[in-house]
Each structure stands twice: as structure tokens, then as C-alpha cells.
Image (cartoon, helix red, strand yellow):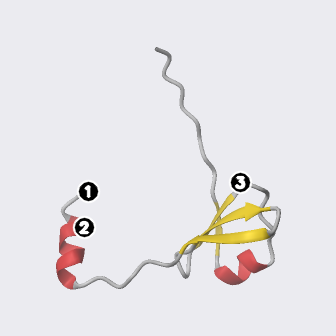
Amino acid sequence: MENNKTLICIRRGTKSELKEIVLQEGELGFTTDTHELYIGSDCGNLLLSKGKRKRKNSDKEKKSEGC
């Protein structure tokens, strides 16, 4: 079996910068200030995922131990 690798590029910037950009259909965009993920569609930029939630200290400790 052939081992193929594909590089996926995600456009990133602040939320205000993303408002000025229309993503192409299927193109991903990530806001570095609000941690939101968008995808481009024929209707414009669609929000896929809201920003991350605030974690309790115990959650942060678990995350630092590794995935």
C-alpha cells in the first residue's frame, strides 16, 4: 500500500480580519483571537466551531500530561 500524505492549509487571522475575507468553498479559516473555525460556502463563511471553553485547573493539568 502506498503511503500518501496531503498537506492541508488553513487560513488564520483575527476575527475582524476574517470578516474582510470570503473563504472559497471548502476552504477553512481559524480565528486566532476567538478560536473559531469557519468553512467557506456559496453562502459565505459558515461557523463550524465556537471558541474553546474556559477550563478548570484540573482540566489544564490533564491536558499538559499529553493526549
> How many residues crowd mark 1 within 10 Å: few (<14), some (14–19), many (20+)?
few
Q: In this rendering, which labeled residue sits more in front, label 1 or label 3?
A: 3
Whether the residues at callouts 2 and 1 have beta carbons within 8 Å, the answer is: yes
Amino acid bearing label 3: Gly
Quadrant into which the C terminus falls: bottom left
Which residue is painted at 54% across and 31% down in the image? 5
Which residue is painted at 58% across and 36% down in the image? 6
Amino acid bearing label 2: Lys
Q: Nearer the viewer, residue 47 or 28?
A: 47
Q: At numbered mark 2, what does the secondary structure look like: helix, strand or loop?
A: helix
Report which quarter residue 53 is drawn in: bottom left
Mark 1 → mark 3, Cα distance in angstroms: 28 Å
Which residue is painted at 59% across and 41% down in the image? 7
Residue located beneath label 2 in the image: 63
Amino acid bearing label 1: Cys
Q: Nearer the viewer, residue 26 or 20?
A: 26
Q: Earlier in the sequence, mark 2 or mark 3?
A: 3
Mark 2 → mark 1, Cα distance in angstroms: 7 Å
Which residue is painted at 18% across and 73% down in the image? 61
Q: In this rendering, which labeled residue sits more in front, label 2 or label 3?
A: 3
Whether the residues at callouts 2 and 3 have beta carbons within 8 Å, the answer is: no
Where residue 54 appears, as percent x and y from the top left, is 35, 85
Residue 52 left/right relative to 15: left
Where residue 57 appears, as percent x and y from the top left, is 20, 83
Q: Earlier in the sequence, mark 1 or mark 3?
A: 3
Q: At numbered mark 1, what does the secondary structure look like: helix, strand or loop?
A: loop
> How many residues crowd mark 2 within 10 Å: few (<14), some (14–19), many (20+)?
few
The answer to whether residue 53 is above or below residue 26 is below
Labelled disc at residue 67: 1
Where residue 47 appears, as percent x and y from the top left, is 63, 73
Residue 67 left/right relative to 40: left
Residue located beneath label 3 in the image: 26
